[in-house]
Image (cartoon, rainbow, N blue to C red):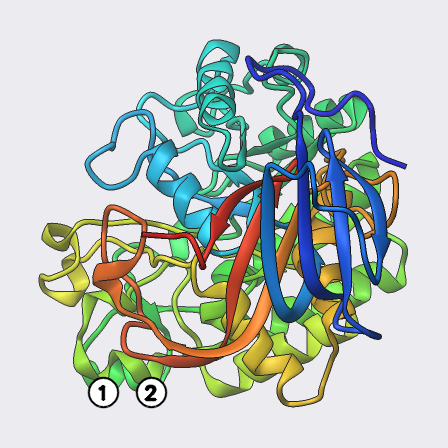
Amino acid sequence: MSDMNYPPTGPLSPATGVTVINDVRPYGEGDAVSVRIVDGVIEEIGPEVSAADAGHVVDGRGGVLLPGLVDMHVHLREPGREDTETIETGSTAAAKGGFTAVFTMANTMPVTDQPIIAESVWAKGQALGLCDVHPVGSITKGLEGKTLTEFGMMANSDAKVRMFSDDGKCVTDPLIMRRAIEYAGGLDVLVAQHAEDHRLTDGAVAHEGPTAARLGLRGWPRTAEESVVARDIMLARDYHARVHVCHATTAGTVDLLRLAKEQGITVTAEVTPHHLTLTDEKLETFDGNYRVNPPLREDTDAAALRQALIDGVIDVVATDHAPHGAEDKCIEFDQAKPGMLGLETSLAIIAELFVHTGLKDWRWVAQVMSERPAEITRLPGHGRPIAVGEPGNLTVVVDESWTVDRTELASKTENSPFDGESYATRVQATLLRGVPTWDADTAS
């Protein structure tokens, strides 16, 4: 059943009214049905449901009905860099991509290292009503890696912060990370690590390998990631808290995660669509849109990541959606800021890689893009079964070809590495507590 304490707080009243979704197949299985949602909760699923009193009627076009997607790792840039993204534009992109909840990282200006900033982000997202925007608190004050933030104050604030990360920077000091893990364990919040030993990546802009050597780019070794992952796995083992590995990229990281899970250590991990599909061969063009942190790796790494996601060694897909303006991308490659857009393309990429190839089905997509992210973050109301009595946080997906046009994306910037790529799956509609936040049929 749905969690009646959801949403945790916020200016919005509970959803009211009736919405009907017609002609959809839950998880892509069985015959098409209709879904009736009343006051934000699924009331009826069947061949025919009443739509006489519906304020919204969504045509599912025979598509797949999924629980609303959850992204554990985005950068919405607000506060501080509203020139590149805002909570409004990022939430719009999320809704168009099928997401009903996102977790926005703490490396804003100012850093989200105190309750008042987290509460501001949460309240703004709720006021917009396009997507539940959950602020991630920083592990250390100012992302400086020296002093822990007040996890408890942020976790108990109106924002109910559930995850802490210095993403963009690694908590390199093992004693600070140990204390963070111990602190998090007592509160049952998640510590998410950007695994990068900065002493090994100073000046690095590309994966350390033949491509970087040929192009004259300073290399970023796999060891920089894997050494931190190994250390944090052992800290999680000894100090009994939940640790999450952000944007895993190497086959060696996969091996470490597999070993940790075999030993019952509470470590989870995410992978991005771009690390599943793109490799450092893309750098031949010196296009700054392919610069990302951590860098694109080799074919062997991408293949290992895909298999790890299938096997459950890597738990979830997360976009690491990172908007940057043209002034920070259309420059020399080694001067470009790292990061790529991802919210509007991620579902299409995962469908192409795994569903259309027959490797996995739509229930699996729901698991890695909705259910497991909500479970790992202890997020009520999202990633729930499609059933009577459950929240109306839903996504409708149809098989219809489309081509990515970076100028038509909802984000304020255009730094998509997938510009011009064509996909066979798109989001038809997204509903947050029964209210359509995106409907392709009514979009202007």
Residue type marked 2:
Pro
- Spatial separation of the CA atoms under disc 1 and disc 2: 6 Å
Q: Residue at x 78, y 44 (%)?
A: 375
**Horizontal relation, residue 191 to residue 400: left or right:** right
Give residue 214's mark: 1
Determine if residue 297 is in view: yes
In this rendering, is residue 234 above or below 216? above
- Residue 295 place in picture, x, y as percent: 39, 66
Determine if residue 222 is in view: no
Snapshot quadrant of residue 304: bottom right
Residue type marked 1:
Arg
Mark 2 packing: few (<14 Cα in 10 Å), some, or many (20+)? few
Where, quadrant-wise, is the N terminus in this rendering? top right
Which is more toward the observer, 22 or 119? 22
Q: Residue at x 13, y 54 (%)?
A: 326
SS at circle 2? helix
- Residue 430 place in picture, x, y as percent: 56, 50
- Residue 331 place in picture, x, y as percent: 9, 61
**Horizontal relation, residue 134 to residue 80: left or right:** right
Which is more toward the observer, 255 or 418? 418
Task: State the residue position of label 2.
Answer: 210
- Residue 434 place in picture, x, y as percent: 66, 39
Q: Residue at x 88, y 64 (%)?
A: 262
**Horizontal relation, residue 167 to residue 236: left or right:** left
Mark 1 packing: few (<14 Cα in 10 Å), some, or many (20+)? few
Furthest residue in direction front, as rendered: 52
* Marks 1 and 2 in Cβ contact (< 8 Å): yes
Snapshot quadrant of residue 52: top right
